Image (spheres, helix red, strand yellow):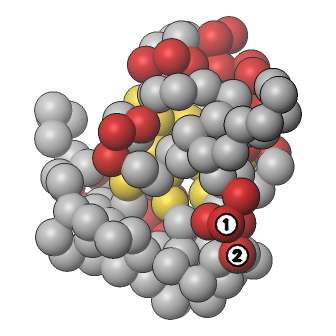
Amino acid sequence: TTAATADAPPAVFCHSYGSVVCGLAASAMDRARVSDLVVLGSPGMRADSAEGLGTGARVWAARDRTDWIRRVTGYDFLGLGHGDDPTDPSFGARVVSSESAQGHTGYFAPGTDSLRNFSRIALGDFDAVRCAEADGGGPGTGPDCRQGLG
């Protein structure tokens, strides 16, 4: 899914295993073509870090604390696996609140923090984005996902 305003490159939103595909394609996403790469409910992006994606786009991530996908992130067995968890602080993505998403399929549900945050990212309204808590999901005490945005 892509979204854009008339004078900005689009943001790309990647859900679930689509985020693996976005991770593989990320190096072709320079900031002139894609402003923001947002993954939600991701099992991994085939990278060890946001920097390792090789993209010029800002990398954002969201995962609801009740999403079952959290059980499959970060595994690698004989080369099988999808890489590190994009919502882990060590990955380096800007982690946004997904409070009220309720599981793996609720990220775009009306009234959720995730949908509000995705809209704000697509519109470039970064000051209004709510960051996730350190333990994921809701808003609050995690690293400031807006740091360095102007």
User: Looking at this view, is 50 or 12 the one in front?
Assistant: 50
In the rendered structure, the answer to whether residue 8 lies left or right of residue 77 reads left
Residue placed under numbered mark 2 in the picture: 68
Residue 148: percent from left, percent from top: 15, 32
Q: Is residue 92 above or below residue 43?
A: above
Looking at the rendered image, the disc whose residue lies closer to the viewer, 2 or 1, is 1
Q: Is residue 78 above or below residue 120?
A: above
- Residue 20 lies in what quarter of the image? top right
Of the residues shown, which amino acid type is indicated by label 1? Arg
Is any part of residue 34 visible from this angle?
no
Q: Are marks 2 and 1 in contact (CB under 8 Å)?
A: yes
Residue placed under numbered mark 1 in the picture: 71
User: Looking at this view, is 103 or 85 the one in front?
Assistant: 85
Q: Secondary structure at mark 2?
A: helix
User: Looking at this view, is 144 or 91 the one in front?
Assistant: 91
- Residue 29 lies in what quarter of the image? top right
